[in-house]
Image (cartoon, coloured by chain):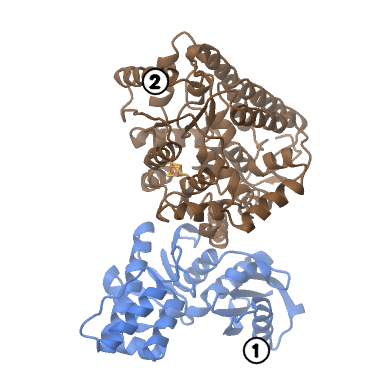
Amino acid sequence: MPLVAGVDVGSLTTKAVILDGDRICGWCLRPTGAFSQQSALAALEEALAACGRAREDLSAIVATGYGRISVPFPARRVTEITCHARGAWAEFPRTRTVIDVGGQDSKVIRVDARGRVTDFAMNDKCAAGTGRFLEVMARALEIDLEEMARLSLSARGRATVSSTCTVFAESEVISLIAQGRPRDEIVRGLHEAICDRLQGLVARVGAEAEITMTGGVALNRGLLAVLQERLGQRINVPRHPQLQGAYGAALIAAEQAA
Amino acid sequence: MASLSPRTRRRALHYALSHAWVLSLARAGLGLPRRPPTEGYLTEAVRWGLGELAAAASRRRPVVWCNVALPSEFVYGLGAVPIMPEMAAGFAAAWRGAPDFIVRADGDGFPPDLCSFHRCALGLAREGWLPRPDAVVATSLFCDGAKKFLAHCSRLFGVPFHLIDVPYEDGSRAVARVAARLQEVAAALQAGGHGFDARHLPRSLELSNRARQHYLEVMRLRRHRPAPWRGSEALSYASVFFMSFGSPGGVRIYDALRRALAARVAGGRFAVPRERWRLLWLHFRPFYPGKLMPFLELEHGAVIAAEDMSHLWWEQLDPGRPWESLARKMTSHFMWGPVERRLEVMLRLARDYAVDGIVHYSHWGCRQSTGAVSILRQAAVGAGIPFLNLDGDCIDPRNGREEQARTRLEAFLESLPERRDAFAAGSGG
Ligand code: SF4
C-alpha cells in the first residue's frame, strides 16, 4: 500500500494527514502563523514523525487550503472544496451536502453519490460567519470556544447581532456586554448570526440529506444545535472535523498513487 | 489633472516613458503582454483608436459621449466621434489608475455601491482625461446607472443630454418609436451646431455591415477546437467592439482579426498550449492586470471560447432605412427585454461553442446582470452545463479578491469532468 500525505494549509491552522492504505497513521494540527510555508513543512514532518516515517517514503502529496499554492515541497494542488467533499464523503458515504466552516471562509458543497463536487457556494467579502469570527467574539466575551458551546446550549433568549461584518459585530458584542445582556444570550445570538449566513449558502446550493459538517467549528455543539434546528436535519460530524480537508487531500493523493 | 494624486501621475508618466508608449498604451488597454505586435489587428485597433482620439481632441469632428449600448453607427453617421467613458474606465484599470480616479468620483458624493465603471469614468471626466463632449446621448438599454451617470456628465460640461428610451418589449411598434426618437435626437444635434451631419449615416451603416461580415467569420473561426483566440483577449477588445462599428477602422480591424485567426487555425497555432476545457464567459472580465485570466486559460487550459458581451447579435443593417435599422439593433439587444432573450443567447452560445461550463462574472454594483444569475444558473444546469457565479469587480482591484476568485474557479474546474478529447496545441484539431 503506498504511503501518501494530505496537507491543508488554512488561514488559522495547518493540518497534515498521512495515510497508509486506508488507515490514518499520522497526523498533525498546528497554527499556521505568519509563515505558511514553514508551517506546511512542519506539519508534514510532524505527521510523518508520528508514524515513524520519512518524506522519502511518500508516494504522493496533495496540498490544499489557501496556502496550497506555495507549499515548499512537490505536491499536487487541489482546492479545499474538492478535498473537504472527498473527506466528508469518505467517512459518511451517504453525504450529499457538506458544510465546512473554515478560518476565513465557509462553504457549502453538494456532492454526488461518488463524492464528486457538483456545486458549491462560499461566503463573500467578509470573515463574518467563519472560524475567525467566532474567535474574535470569544475574545471580546473573554471566554474560550468550549465555554461558548456550553453557554449557547443553556441560553433561554438570544441577542441580535449583525452578521455582515466581523468588526461591527465585535463592537455590537461589546455594547451588549456593557448593557448587561447575559453572555449566554449573546453567544446564542452569535451562533444564530453565523447560521443566518450558513443557511443562505445552503439555500443557494440546496440541502440534500445527509449533511456532514467539517472544520473545527463542527466541534461547537452550541452552533451545531442551532444549525440542525434551522435545517431540520441531523448533521454528521466526523471524528476529526478539523482534519477533514487534509484527509480528503490524502485520499486524492492515494488515488493518484494507485 | 492637478488634483490627481502624485501616485497616479507617476504611474501615468512612468507608463508613457517606459514604453514605446503609443502601442504600449493600447496594449495595456487591451490587456496584452508587452511585446511587439505580430498580427495586424492590434496595429489596426491602435491606428483606429488614436485616429478617433486625435479627431476628438483637435475638434475636427464633434464628440458625443454615450453608453456602450448606443450603436456607434449612429454617432459615426452624424460625422461625430463616439466616446464611451465606461470603456475608458477599462483602460484606466488596465494601467492600474482606476482606484485613484474612483476616489476622485467618491469626492463627488457617489456611494461605493455604484458600479465602478461609472465611478472611474467620472474621475476620468473630472480630471480632464477624456475629450470634452459636445453632446451626451444615453439609451435606456440595460444599464440604468449609465443614464444617470451620463446625465451627471452633461451637467458637468454644460452640454445637452439626450435620452433614447427603448421599450422593454421588442416588436414593430417599439422599432418605430425608437427610430422616431433617433431621428429627433439627430435633428436636435444638427440644430445645435458643432458640425453634426446625418448625411454620413448610409456610409456608416454600410461600413458597419462590412465589419459585421468579418466579425461573423471571426465568430465562426472561434468555434474551432482548439480555440484560436483567448476569450480574455477578446474581452479586452470590448471597447473596439462597442465603438468601432460604423467606422472605416472597424472594417480594417475585423478584417485583420479574421485573417489572423484563419492563419492560426490553418497553421495549427492555438490560444492555449493544451485546451482542457472550454468556457462561456458572461458579462465582462476584470480589466486590471492580474493573475486570474492567465491562471484560468494558460495554467489550467480552460479557454474562454465565447463571451456573451462580444457576440454579434444584430441583423444586417439597411443603409436605405437607417433609422429603422439602428432601432432594430437596439430593440433586439440580448441584454434587454425579457430574460428569455439572454437565456436563449447563453444556451445557443454554449451549444455553438461546445463549452464545458459557464462562468458569470458578477461585477460589484451591476444589478442588471447579476439580477438574472439565478435564472441563468437554473437554465444552464437544466441543460446539463455546470455554472459558476464569480463575484468581483471589473475595474476596481480593491474589490477584486483575486485569491478567492482563483479558488472558486479552480474548484469549479475540478468539478468539471475532464474532456475526453482534450486537445494539445499543434494537433491541428
Ligand atoms: S457593469 Fe453593469 S452597472 Fe456597470 S456599466 Fe455595465 S451594465 Fe452598467
Q: Position of residue A198 (x, y in %)?
A: 37, 68
Q: Within the image, what quadrant is residue A43 found in?
A: bottom right
Left or right: residue B316 compared with residue B52: left
Q: Secondary structure at mark 1?
A: helix
Q: Identity of the amino acid at label 1?
A: Ala
In the foreground, A174 or B429? A174
Residue drawn at point x = 63 percent, y = 21 percent: B251
- Residue B367 vertical placement versus B350 (above, below): below
Q: Which residue carries the number 2 mark?
A: B188
In the foreground, B159 or B232? B159
Q: Identity of the amino acid at label 2?
A: Ala
In the foreground, A118 or B378? B378
Q: Within the image, what quadrant is residue A98 found in?
A: bottom left
- Residue B187 vertical placement versus A170 (above, below): above
Q: Chain of mark 2?
A: B
Residue drawn at point x = 62 percent, y = 47 percent: B94
Q: Position of residue B411 (x, y in %)?
A: 54, 59
Task: Report whether residue A127 is seen.
Answer: yes
* Mark 2 vs mark 1, CA separation in Å: 82 Å
Chain B: give its colour: brown
Q: Position of residue A24 (x, y in %)?
A: 58, 81
Residue drawn at point x = 70 percent, y = 89 percent: A52
Task: Report whether residue A111 is seen.
Answer: no
Quarter of the image that includes the C terminus of chain A = bottom right
Q: Position of residue B372 (x, y in %)?
A: 37, 44
- Residue B267 vertical placement versus A160 (above, below): above
Q: Which residue carries the number 1 mark?
A: A50
